[in-house]
Image: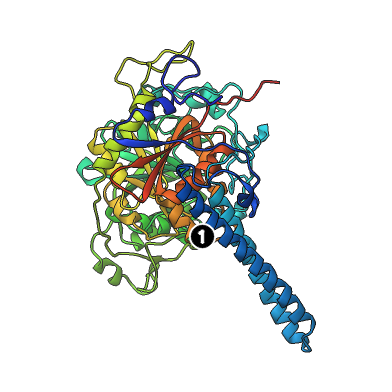
Amino acid sequence: MPMPLQRGTSGGGARVSDVLRDNSQMKDKTGDNTSTLRFPFAFFFTDKAADPYTSRNNKQRLMLLFVKTTLALIVLLALAGSFWWTISISTSSSSGHVYQRSHSYRRLQEQLVSDLLDIGDISVGPTRWKELEYCDVDSESYVPCFNVSESLDRFCGSREGCLVLPPVDYKVPLRWPTGKDVIWFRNVKITADEVLTSGSINKRMMMLDDDQVRTILDIGCGYGSFGAHLLSKHLLTMCIANYEASGSQVQLTLERGLPAMIASFVSKQLPYPSLSFDMLHCSSCGIDWDQKEGLFLVEIDRVLKPGGYFVWTSPLTNARSKEDVKRWNFVHDFAESICWTLLSQQDKTVVWKKTTKTKCYSSRKPGVGPSVCNKGHEAESPYYKPLQMCLHPEEVGEDAENWKATVIEYWSLLSPLIFSDHPKRPGDEDPSPPYNMLRNVLDMNAQFGGLNSALLEAKKTVWVMNVVPTAGPNHLPMILDRGFVGVLHDWCEAFPSYPRTYDLVHADNLLSLQTSQHRSSCSLLNIFTEIDRLLRPEGWVIIRDTAQLVETARALTTQLKWEARVIEVESSSEQRLLICQKPFTKRQSI
């Protein structure tokens, strides 16, 4: 029995199949759930058409038979070629030629098998494959690439082929804005005492002009208090912190509906382009800025815009011991050497401002401070680059993209499902309307940040993590310059966030981008398993891509136990929408 596609585990709300069928603007399509083996030749022996939307008329049956016959002929020719090549190798008189030809043969054979698997995947369409098993209890807060030693930093290995379940006592977060101030602390494995003793945010913005600050990066973000405070001033703050197995700053911040992600200063540059932020904030963030000859401060300078602020709160600024005074003097003098001006020092908080005048760098005495980066440095593509001891004083541009019609289209599809029958669980009380069922949105291929812009224009109370895939053009500087939050990421690796952190995941033509890379170690199933890890129970997925890739994606959703529906948009004959919902499956208590 399919899971309900409305919020809540009971009630008479509409299912996705009921609501989408009645949408007069879209053409609903249903699929075939026949079980089949993931085998390259399986589609030759099925009685049903590969395309679930193909009419059963004689003409199309003949066309399908022709295609199957052609593919069978290709397989036979490949096998015949394989047999001939084997004989050719065995009769060759040169051992060197034998090795070269054998090596080439193996490569061709591997490519043939890969191509046949791809053909098989596409041909079986949305038929039901074997569902993935659930991960063990140790994976409830597992973050691939970060549950390892720090020496690996952001490097990722292969991911588990299983689905991460929430804890036994997990509850779906409260609706925004109630969820900003009230959270289920068992969702993030943290005690109430830890939150109450986490400190406050006083005197951080005392010297800053709000009009000058739009993009803010909070390092070592505590529990998101700084970001929550600035949200009242209509400033969106990105929080970063190291991975923590329990009591995670990042996990709790996301649970509150505020932007956050895992990031580290260990050895690699942060995944942001140069000149990205108006302000960087560090309140007892645990980073020793005097270490590595000031290299961490240079990384701050790289992502800080000209005229931007670095706000630092630390006991070191009021040093008394000889050693602490020496450390403070180093930070103070190094900041001056990279053309920062100390604006103010009050209690334990200091504020520096980065220069807007490039002549400051050329007027320094020889040997003072890092050199300016040469033109050969690709300042806007820091992904997996080592930290560099040089400065980037150039400017970045801004661009705009409008997705107004797309957001209206998405909301017209989701609203009847989300708000049907006033979704409420037994024993749970919802705040009085208006309330928002979506808060944390992940845009996996943000391009110019158009979805983010359109959601704000439509006055949706969401925030968007704009991800720019490393496989495509780097538009992240444009996104950040518009005042949005974003990051560079390789979707063949795990995203640096905890499980169950997003209400909605959106992917516009991401599948086309990823499949064009032809990376054998990165399958679509890996990407979809990662989406499932990041998605909250009862969360939504919207995928827009070519019809062929959307059909392949729908077949994968059966393995994830999602309920999915393909929608044909009349305005585009080549593209399809795939709308999915993840069920709320609880682990059984022992």
Labels in figure, total? 1
Residue extending furthest bottom?
Answer: 93
- State left or right for residue 415 relative to residue 290: left
List the residue tagged with mark 1: 292
Callout 1 amino acid: Lys
- SS of the residue at dot 1? helix
Query: Residue at horizontal 34%, vertical 64%?
Result: 392
Whether residue 15 is visible here, answered yes or no, is: yes
Where on the picture, by quarter, is residue 164? top right
Residue extending furthest top?
Answer: 427
Whether residue 353 is visible here, answered yes or no, is: no
Q: Residue 468, how many percent across, how many down? A: 40, 53
Query: Residue at horizontal 59%, vertical 44%?
Result: 47
Q: Is residue 16 above or below residue 316?
A: above
Q: Is residue 115 above or below residue 205?
A: below
Q: Residue 301, how many percent across, how many down? A: 36, 57
- State left or right for residue 571 relative to residue 441: left
Here the colouring is rainbow
Q: Residue 9, how many percent across, how many down? A: 50, 18
* Camera-side residue of 45 and 524: 45
Q: Is residue 310 above or below residue 388?
A: above
* Camera-side residue of 30 and 484: 30
Q: Residue 487, how many percent across, how many down? A: 41, 50
